[in-house]
Amino acid sequence: MALQLEQVSYTYDARSLLRQTALNDVNLELAEGGLTGIAGASGSGKSTLLQLLNGILLPTEGTVRVLDVTLTAGRKPPKLASLRRRVGLVFQFPEQQLFAATLEEDLIFGPLNFGASPEDAAGRARKALEQMGLEEALLSRHPLQLSGGQRRKAAIASVLAMDPDILVLDEPGATLDQVSRMELTLLLHRLCREEGKTVIIVTHRLDELLPYADRWMIMHEGRAVFQGTTRGLVDEARQLPGYGLSVPQPIQYWLELEEVYGLQTEEPCLSPSALAERLTQLASAEAKKERAYA
């Protein structure tokens, strides 16, 4: 099990009159090697949840288990350096954290801090850049010489250079154009499928992640109101507006096809190409029936 939350709550300023509960009695289990999407309206607790996963925040109630580390409310936590290397957390707009004179200096900073030799750190930097689909020639450039999409990928590469087992990203596609967002989503999907990384992505663009996520978690007012597969999310999609989320267009189209053609037992087709292909198959089958009865 990659991570497990048991009755976890988190309250900001817990001992103050200004205390505010951001998470309330959250339970979660995620297996290793999967891609999980987390969605919810602003203020639903998504970002707080992510910060519990590598010990930036500690639970005020309940227990968080991540890999072989256990964080229990009210108990002194273990040393967290190893956890923070193994759980890479990418905040929104991570390119703002690039600070060095060259991209290579940025990418080797983390590995060096965690004890890697200069040669090992340089090798990790090159591998991480390749994992993000960027050319090695960019290593000598100043980060501001890169395009917006390249800087975003480079910032994620700076986390990958520490070779985390779990990669957690908060709105990684924010402010990017659609083409750049899809390129990034495909790269993260490949990291999961080909390299066995456990990937967790917070997103408000459910439609773009639907074809790739294994599981989904929907947050609402600090609670996990849905957890399950993409098939389960489709079945519960009509509840999403009550949680401040729109029903994604691919799910709307699929639900219409289900109703017309009785496809409730099929795995949903939620990418544009898969939807188009399935619709073509259904139309062809209908045409054959009409010719048979003509």
Image (cartoon, rainbow, N blue to C red):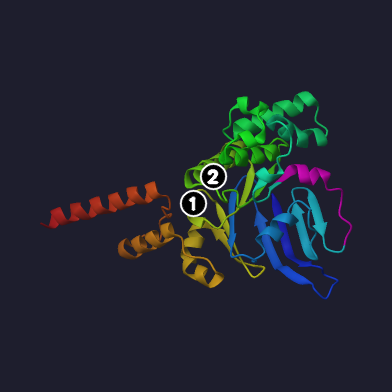
- Label 1 amino acid? Glu
* Crowd tier of the residue under label 2, counting other residues whose Cα lies within 10 Å: few below 14, some 14–19, many 20 or above: some
- Label 2 amino acid? Thr
Q: Earlier in the sequence, mark 2 or mark 1?
A: 2
Place residue 193 in its image quadrant. top right
Labelled disc at residue 185: 2
Seen as rendered, the residue at the extreme right is 76
* Residues in magenta, as a range: 75-88
Labelled disc at residue 234: none
What residue sits 73% from the left and 37% below the top?
162
The quarter of the image holding the C terminus is: bottom left
Q: Quick check: 214 left or right of 112?
A: left
Q: Position of residue 69 (x, y in %)?
A: 80, 50
Place residue 99 in its image quadrant. top right
Q: Which of 251 and 184 is in front in this view?
A: 184
SS at mark 1?
A: helix
Magenta-span inclusion, residue 84: yes
Q: Is residue 258 above or below residue 281?
A: below
Q: Nearer the viewer, residue 182 or 288?
A: 182
Q: Are marks 2 and 1 in contact (CB under 8 Å)?
A: yes
Q: Give the labeled residue for mark 1.
A: 208
Q: Can residue 114 be seen in this view?
A: no
Q: Quick check: 73 left or right of 253?
A: right
Q: Is residue 188 above or below residue 250?
A: above
Q: Position of residue 287 (x, y in %)?
A: 19, 53
What residue sits 56% from the left and 70% below the top?
243
SS at mark 2?
A: helix
Q: Is residue 214 visible?
A: yes
